Amino acid sequence: MSNIYLFSVKKQKPIPRPFIFFRRPLYSNTLQQVVDIMKMTPKLILQQPINHATLPISKTSINPNVPNTSFSAPQLINLYNVPSIAPTTGKRKVIIAIIVAYTYPNVKADLQTFWKSYANYGPNSTPPTLNVYTMPGSTPNSGWALEECLDVQMVCSINPNANIWVVEAKTDGLTDLLAAIEYATGTIHADVISMSWGGSDFASYSQYNTYFTNTTKCFCAATGDANVVSWPSTVSNVIAVGGTTLLWNPNSPNLRTEFTWSGAGCGYSSTMAKPTYQNGLAALALSGQTRRAIPDVSLIANPQTAFSVVYAGNWNSVGGTSVSTPFFSAIISLANQSRINAGKPTLTSVYNTNTAQLTSTQRAGYIPPSNNIQQYLYKTILSTPGKYSADFNDITIGTDAGTTAAGGTTTYSTAKGYDITTGLGSPNVTELCSDLYNNI
């Protein structure tokens, strides 16, 4: 496999990269620099000064300027209304697997520092048990090590009662990452698989869609941080998780205000057909398109409104869809735990086990599995105003550049309900988990 990088235009397969942004420590009265390590090379971005008097929060076509913020885990739990759901007597723990590349020997030590911080759960608290499986031949890599710490600390925070695994692939080559997915599904028997990485939306990737066909699993993938769509989030059997800009608003009944994040991956796949669960969506003429649109959902990702992560013993403010993806993966694990407690089957993101049909026009009468998450999100929650307003925060401010079905780029705007910039919006977690437990 050749050494081809994410989003580069090459003939062969690009090596997937983590979708993660790292913000240097905050110093007063200075502009912050953002280091984009998605391609393993520094990319400095100067954030613009904030003019509070002209904050354009009333304009849906403009992304508002926001202050630099870094949220703790308890803050995110509060803002997104995340419940605590533990296994009941005699019931197994839901299993969630985080797929990363390379190995990081200090991931458990950094989790201890993160967890016992006064910013999170305090020195007398005990972090969840973390299971790590390292594929033979895996070596350390600093960029992926930060990714691993982020994913682990997010998943542990959102569902500390789960059976949490990290599968460390040998390298960031696609073959090795797919082997890690196969280990997570076939050996660990994970219920939820979290993937904060991706590659270009090449037609040649379709041959690997068979890795996402187990109807007892839920696969979640990041849409990326480069204003283009990325595989495997474009696969209809995968929940595509995009990004938002998150603000804490103590004067709002919902506490949180969210806008688009102008760096998130979004748009149309040029290789994947539109799944039937996206039929009939009016937003941005989606009903006239024949291709899969992403994201499905979005959560905190803007590196200016980041998540506080411990890596190598130090605190870092981290953004990117690498934040939102393990977050949503853990949310699905919460819903699954409720279902396991009640003896119900776990939820699946797998829409069609016939992978050849994922790239061709779906027949009108096709019915996905009864426990398919996307079918319920789009066809029941979105189409029922009361459910939608309870389960999701509809994001209606901002724009985001993304991919067209022809492979170009354009700027998309938010809309009421579903839109290309943030999908269905961000979840109100307690309500969504309750709905996914009771009504599928």
Image (cartoon, rainbow, N blue to C red):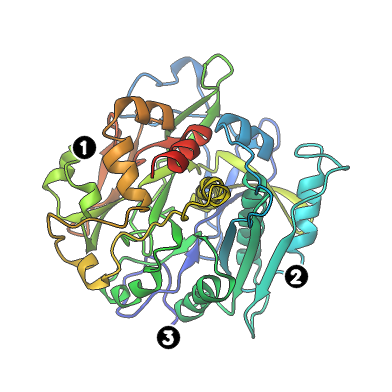
As rendered, which of 197 and 88 lies closer to the eye? 88
Q: Quadrant of the N terminus?
A: bottom left
Quadrant into which the C terminus falls: top left
Mark 3: amino acid: Met
Query: Residue at coordinates 29% horizontally, 42% vertically from top-left?
Result: 378
Q: Which amino acid type is marked by label 1?
A: Ala
Q: Do the residues labelled 2 and 3 touch (CB within 8 Å)?
A: no
Earlier residue among tags 1 and 2 = 2
Position of 192 with respect to 283 (left or right) is right
Residue drawn at (52%, 60%), measured in percent from left and top?
Answer: 191
Marks 1 and 2, how far apart in space? 46 Å
Distance from Cα at disc 2 to Cα at disc 3:
27 Å
Q: Nearer the viewer, mark 2 or mark 3?
A: 2
Amino acid at circle 2: Pro
The answer to whether 361 appears left or right of 408 in the picture is left
Badge 1 density bin: few <14, some 14–19, many ≥20, Cα 10 Å: some
| Residue designated by label 3 | 1
| Residue 143 appears in the rendering | yes
Residue position marked by numbered label 1 in the rendering: 283
- The percent coordinates of residue 193 (x first, y second) are 51, 62
In screen coordinates, is 198 left or right of 290? Answer: right
Residue 167 in the image: state x and y as whole percent: 61, 70
**Dot 2 lies on which element?**
loop
Which circle marks residue 105 in the picture?
A: 2
